[in-house]
Amino acid sequence: MDPGAATKPLTWTESVELFRTYLRLERGVSPHTLRAYQSDLEQFHEHLLTKTGSPSVSVDEITSDLVRSFLAVLHSKVEKTSQARKISALRSFFGFLHERGCTDKNPASGITHPKIKSRIPSFLTVDDVFHFLDSLRQWARTPGASWRRSRNWALYECLYSTGMRVSEVVGLNEEDLFEARGMVLVLGKGKKERIIPVGKKALEAVDQYLRTLEEQSPGLRTKSPALFVNARGDRISTRSVHRILLAELKRCGLWKPLSPHGLRHSFATHLLNSGADLRAIQEMLGHSSLSTTQRYTHVHLEQLMKTYDAAHPRSRRKSP
């Protein structure tokens, strides 16, 4: 930044707009992440207006006490995970401004995250996944079935086969799938590309889906480059993928509040339980840090403990 650019304190609106531009152009965050940052900053700004009684507060006037007072208000209103996210948003925002010379301090730098109990990711057993996907295949192959049934089968086969994030699978275009090589090109977080394998079952499901779509509604296939489309021919949304998943799980008798991310967890857990290398799983999931992938070792260890408790003679307590 030009040395003279920071002589005049930035207004809150100017600061947020500068930060948004940085997130969008330099960090390449998703629209969902951008909205989350925007929401957290707006909520903090509302608190500032209430706390200071001033219609406008420059970023230089914001102190650590104001940040702490915001978190104190949140304490009884939102979960600890949401509190932690808002702290991270403020820390990133003020850190960005400080690094560019827009402020002389980061008032959120000394604020600690609330202690969050580690939760084991939810996932389906191998048997449940097979039952779910086999049910989708059966319904898709019922004579006269709509192309949507084939789409749903292909969609969830792809999610489980590759471990993709739901945002990544809805962002796929037909050209991203290299069927002959059994690979798919994925655009992940931060617009980082990776090529990962996709299984034969998923490719079989995608092939049937595209053929059925072409036969029943050829105009929809040409309207968008998207691989997975909705009834208007537009790219299917992440919200729709979640909603359809819950409906399909119930339809096949699996009454579990599972999100599409649960299929990603299932993918990683089943690979790990089968002896897959943690580094390879990290690569397929697109995790920048191995520590993120290591969450799945907790799932693996829990399964080991259940097996141990059920099978080891010295672990079973006898009734008196």
Image (tube, rainbow, N blue to C red):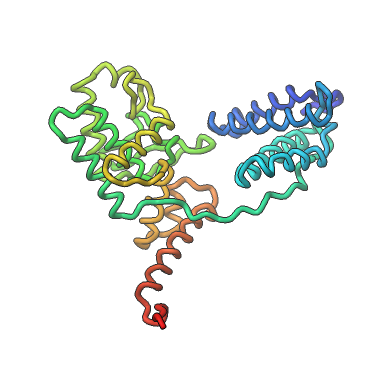
- The spot of residue 175 in percent (x, y) is 33, 29
Q: Which residue is farthest front?
A: 320
Tell me the residue at 31%/21% (across/down).
231
- The spot of residue 222 in percent (x, y) is 30, 18
- The spot of residue 45 in percent (x, y) is 73, 29
Quadrant placement of the C terminus: bottom left
Above or below 290: residue 149? above
Q: Quadrant of residue 171?
A: top left
184 left or right, relative to 218: right
Q: Nearer the viewer, residue 32 or 278?
A: 32
188 left or right, relative to 151: right
Q: Quadrant of residue 245?
A: top left
Tell me the residue at 75%/33% (across/down).
97
Q: Quadrant of residue 202?
A: top left
Tell me the residue at 47%/45% (across/down).
286
Above or below 193: residue 224? above
- The spot of residue 225 in percent (x, y) is 35, 23
Tell me the residue at 53%/47% (across/down).
288
Quadrant placement of the N terminus: top right
